[in-house]
Amino acid sequence: MTPRTFHRQLFWLIVAGVSTVLVSLSLVVSPASAKPPTQETVKYCLSCHGNPTLSTTLPSGETLSLYIAQDDLNHSVHSNVGIECEACHNDISEYPHPAIQFQTKRELSLSYYQTCEKCHSSNYEKTQDSMHAQAAAAGNENAPVCTDCHGAHDVRPPDEPRSLISVTCEQCHSEIVKTYRESVHGAALMKDENPDVPVCTTCHGVHNIQDPRTSQFRVAEPELCAGCHADPQLMGKYGLSSDVYDIYKRSWHGVDVSVYKARWPTIWHDSAVCSDCHGIHDIRSTGDPASKVNEKNLLSTCQQCHPTAGPNWTDAWTGHNEISLERTPFLFYVEKFYGSFTPFVLWACVIYVILQIVRATVDRVRSSRP
Amino acid sequence: MSGKNAKSTTLARQERSFLRFTVGQRWEHAILLLSGLVLLLTGLPQKYREFSISQDLLSTPEQIFLIRQVHHIAAIVLSLLVMYHVGRILVLMSRRRLPGDLLPTMQDLRDAWHMLQYLLFLRKDKPRFGRYNFEQKVTYWVVFFSVAIMGISGLIIWFPVQMTQVLPGGVVPAAKLAHSTESVALAIFIVIWHIYHVHIERLNLSMFTGRLSEEELRTFHEKEYQRLANQSGEMK
């Protein structure tokens, strides 16, 4: 081996050694750099905003806390998928930050929530058709925006647990939610997070919540209730009849409502829909003495629309029940009569007339022959 | 066979005819026919509201009220007619001058049995009828009781609140069912029974002209013809 070849070998040995070190270094380092930069950003931002006392005073005089709790972010649906601060705070990209332009805290919320549209465009558009958006357009700056219901830094699944939905709506609609919690639906929700009872959004919709006081909402209401109350499996679970909707549709009220729904959904009419008798947020089991349709209260409920009705009147209502001898004897016998005697008479007439036609035809044919 | 002969003889000589229905009776029938038709035509779209043709007819809420009002007016007309008809019966009865021709008798059952045998080719001759045959009596009594049911049930569903001050509440849905079912049953009955017998089997317009020809009377109401013949014979 000549010294020259030795040097050459040494050179390659060093190259190989250095490359090995570099490769293994890069292997060690790369997992760290492949991590989402989120944590880095969050960490970076929280290095200031993690301070619970950090705050500023807005021109309105309100104190705006600038503290972001690590715990909120930990539970947020966004942080866990790597969506970082500047996804929403897209006006802040450097430190020191540009000066805050907002006069009030509300102004700040009303500005920042618009960034939700970037990812959630379909739900965002739905909210633009909602009653809340109408209230906002009419100048109510407290009309809710995305963050009022979903939260800002602590966005979590809105229905976990299910009762959280009513808590969310309660922030503004406290009286109604209070009533709802005492109803048969609300009580079941509060007691054991019942998965079947309607929560606010079941009836009112989620993002495109409409005004429930319109005639359109009114005529569509029976179908809304029927969504659950005509489902035999669901009703069977609670020992309730799933025929109530079908029987209602055949009733005086139901026929009226169906015509209005088909022809004049925008014309107000007073023929009773479900909530007129059962209540709206205060629906109770019919056996509950506080229920509007409990035996004791039924007459006064009828008198809402039929003010001169007497005590016999409540029996005129068949109560969503099929015809039966015990409950509706008059109806029972009338139906029996028209189910047996009348068809018998009519069939006898048909047969008699057919026999007459046969006999007359035969006679005519016979007499035409010589 | 007899129809042909009757026609030729009618044409052959000027025939005697017999008064069958008085002017009053003919008016009664005409009013019954018209009011009944109006009631049916205004009632059906209310009964079958789910059909789009009904909804076309009841195309505005005002139209519903109009149709209901027409129905109620026709109902009042028919009620007045019924009052007149029943009142007249009572008056005639009190004077012992009510002709009993329309009352069902045992003879009608025998005639019906006879007719059934004839229709089943078990007999060659038709029964000989009096002034009204059993088919016509059936028509009268079915319409009589149907109108009674329609009237009473109609009154209950027209004034449900007032009626239940006295009557039990259960009569209201029962009346509603009776009213709408009876109306259709009666309409079906009129079409298959009455229309067949007075228009298709033979054209019998005596309810409008008031008279039956001698030939018709002899063919279809032989006993009555004989009775009248005897009567006029005795008179002579």
Image (spheres, coloured by chain):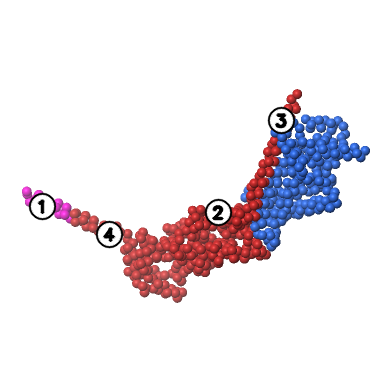
Chain colours: A red, B blue
Q: Is residue A264 left or right of residue B70?
A: left
Magenta segment: does it hold A12?
yes
Q: To which chain does the residue with label 3 belong? A: A
Q: Which tag is nearer the camera, tag 1 or tag 4?
A: 4
Q: Residue furthest bottom?
A: A61
Q: CA distance from mark 1 to mark 4?
A: 38 Å
Who comes first in sequence, dot 2 or dot 3? 2
Who comes first in sequence, dot 2 or dot 4? 4
Residue type for callout 3: Val
Mark 1 surroundings within 10 Å by alpha-carbon count, few (fewer than 14), some (14 through 19), many (20 or more): few
For label 1, the SS is: helix
A225 and A368: which is toward the camera? A368
Q: Are marks 2 and 4 on the same chain?
A: yes
Mark 2 surroundings within 10 Å by alpha-carbon count, few (fewer than 14), some (14 through 19), many (20 or more): some
Q: Main secondary structure of the magenta part?
A: helix
- Checking the image for residue A362, the label placed there is 3
Residue drawn at 69 percent across, 36 percent down: A354
Q: Is residue A125 left or right of residue B119?
A: left
What residue did someone put label 1 on? A7
Q: CA distance from mark 2 to mark 3?
A: 53 Å
Q: At which x and y percent is residue A125? A: 48, 58
Mark 3 surroundings within 10 Å by alpha-carbon count, few (fewer than 14), some (14 through 19), many (20 or more): few
A226 and A268: which is toward the camera? A226
